[in-house]
Amino acid sequence: MNFQNQKSKSFLPWLDVLALLAWGGLLLRYWINGQLRLLIHPNYFWLVFVTGIVLLVLGILRSGLIIVDSRKQDTNSPTLEHITLFPPGVGSGILVATALAGFLIAPMVLTSQTALQRGVSESLPITRSQPQSFGATTKPEERSIVDWVRTLNAYPEPEAYAGQKVKVSGFVVHLSHFPDNYLLISRFILTCCAVDAYPVGLPVKLETSRSEYPPDTWLEIEGE
């Protein structure tokens, strides 16, 4: 009984190592295969990469310390017990299980259904920072959907943009209150990660029915 108890305790430090290596490997996997763009803003890609490397290094160092300690350990010396909120190994076990789930489950792509659920808009939500002034620094045809939304949000006067060329790309969203010859070409704006992503879009008037362009279809649209 004591042997089994001692054996289980000797395995617990290796569970910590497994948690460090699993999370380091998961972060680097997301970075290598490009799935990070589905989870966080590109400005934080470097932070994820560095964190993954650090976790792998810590896992390797931790495993080395465990091996050294096991060789120096005196089996006859008393072991000190300390009180923890959870049983030993529970926290590391949860981390390992979460990392394994990350390896098995691919990140969810933000879709038109997500945009509808989060309230796709033709302007910036009032909870976001509102520009007080705006100066156009790019040609109209070089503006993205986000650029156009910010421009219209800063100066919502339709006549000021009459005849300007537009060339944008995004995914299709069908709004129920739009006529059949209108759709919304949309993008998600990420300030930090996918959790706080919010959709914006531009209404597009078609010469045909929008049924020819199913939701989530990616299009590049030119018009004025």
Image (cartoon, helix red, strand yellow):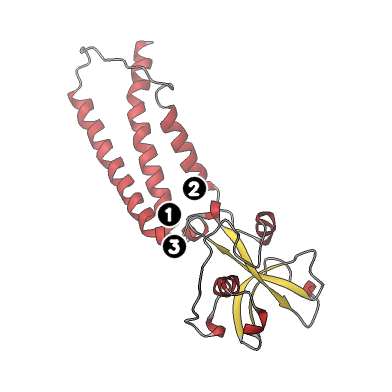
Q: Earlier in the sequence, mark 3 or mark 1?
A: 1
Q: Nearer the viewer, mark 2 or mark 3?
A: 3
The residue labelled by disc 1 is 29
Instruction: State the count of labels.
Output: 3
Label 3 sits on a secondary structure element that is helix
**Amino acid at the residue labelled 2:** Phe
Q: CA distance from mark 3 to mark 1?
A: 16 Å
Most foreground residue, 124 or 154: 154
Three-letter code for the amino acid on which mark 3 is drawn: Pro
State the separation of the CA atoms marked 2 and 3: 21 Å
Up/down of 118 relative to 150, above or below:
above
- Where residue 224 appears, x then y in whole percent? 66, 85
Where does residue 163 sit, x and y in percent of width and height? 65, 89
Secondary structure under badge 1?
helix
Residue situated furthest left in the rendering: 72
Tag 1 near tag 2, CB within 8 Å: yes
Nearer to me, 153 or 199: 153
Task: Look at 82% across and 73% down and name the residue there.
Answer: 180
- Real-space Cα distance between discs 1 and 2? 8 Å
What residue is at 62 percent from the left and 65 percent from the top?
200
Residue drawn at 81 percent across, 76 percent down: 209
Mark number displayed over residue 42: 3
Residue 9 quadrant: top left
Residue bearing the label numbered 2: 103
Is residue 127 shown above or below 222? above
Circle nearer the N terminus (1, 2): 1
Residue 95 is situated, as x and y percent measured from the top left of the image, at 44, 37
* Callout 1 amino acid: Arg
Please, what secondary structure does the residue beneath circle 2 have?
A: helix
Instruction: From the viewer's side, name the closer residue of 125 and 20.
Output: 125
